[in-house]
Amino acid sequence: MNKTLIYLCLAFILSICANRSLYAQKTDVAFKVVNHVDSLALAKASIILIRNKDSAFLGFGITDSTGQYTFNKLKLKSGTSFVVSSLGFIPVSVPVKSTDSALIHHYISLKPDTGLLADVIVQSATAVQMNGDTLEYNTEFFKTMPNAVVEELLKKLPGIEFRNNDEIYADGQRVSKITVDGKDFFSSDPKVLLKNLPAELIKKVQIVDEKNTVATETRQKEDIPKIINLKLKKRFAKAFWVKYLQVMELIKDMRREAF
């Protein structure tokens, strides 16, 4: 009887410890990013959570107008780091440390770029960055299988998600359109493009706000849909558009014959 009671007590204590451990693994990580020269907030700085051994992307965020961004409920693990960067500044790597805290604050002061930073941090920072109002993903850092299509590439990009009925969201906002080199693709259904265009043709994936003047003036910033632009590699661009024009001519011929 006494042994049974002891075992039950031990099991109860271990379950509490396990629950505390699981809870401790979920941490909010808040960043404040400023310019080292004048201490002014840096908006649109990118913050990437990477795995150190292979630079795999585990999380991503962009600072707001006050230079702040918070990752919610992260399971922090050793062997990972945050990389904080902004165009024209030297990226900073922040190693992740084990903690029991529910909230961690990081104040990051970025110095003007001198070109002397270690390659691994520079590469991680340039994989995802803000270029003006455009968020750009460099596809060289997001490897896919040899015969992968664009849909598989997009699923590897942090901040892009596929929801019900394959609806695409970027930075939490619905994607209203997908363009190629800034031009509308002939199909109104983006699934045709996503499931057929080879990923190897794409140099960059760009995310921009929908430029509908009425929409942008009457909606809150967070309600404005996104547009995904697929920037082709130069060596493929000419052949792609030649084929595109051929297909368009074929469609026109088919329509004329139908009437």
Image (cartoon, rainbow, N blue to C red):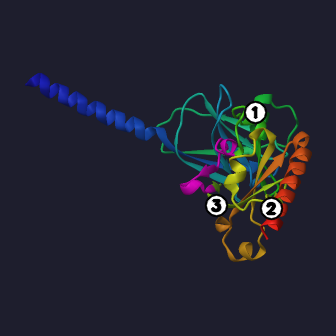
Q: Is residue 75 placed above or below 256 in the rendered structure? A: above
Q: Which residue is mark 1?
A: 121
Looking at the rendered structure, which numbered label has been put on residue 174?
3
What residue is rendered at 50% in x and 35% in y? 99
What residue is rendered at 23% in x and 28% in y? 10
Query: CB under 8 Å between callouts 1 and 2?
Result: no
- At mark 3, the secondary structure is strand
Question: Nearer the viewer's eye, disc 1 or disc 2?
Answer: 2
* Rendering coords of residue 257 (x, y %): 81, 65
Residue 249 visible? The answer is yes
Q: Nearer the viewer, residue 99 or 220?
A: 220
Q: Which residues are magenta?
A: 151-168
* Rendering coords of residue 86 (x, y %): 78, 46
* Rendering coords of residue 102 (x, y %): 48, 45
- At mark 1, the secondary structure is helix
Distance from label 1 to label 2 (Cα)? 53 Å
Q: Which residue sits furthest top?
A: 3
Looking at the rendered structure, which numbered label has been put on residue 254?
2
Q: Amino acid at mark 2?
A: Met
Q: Amino acid at mark 3?
A: Arg
Q: Is residue 259 left or right of residue 14?
A: right
Q: Is residue 179 left or right of residue 77?
A: right
Query: CB under 8 Å between callouts 2 and 3?
Result: no
Query: CB under 8 Å between callouts 1 and 3?
Result: no
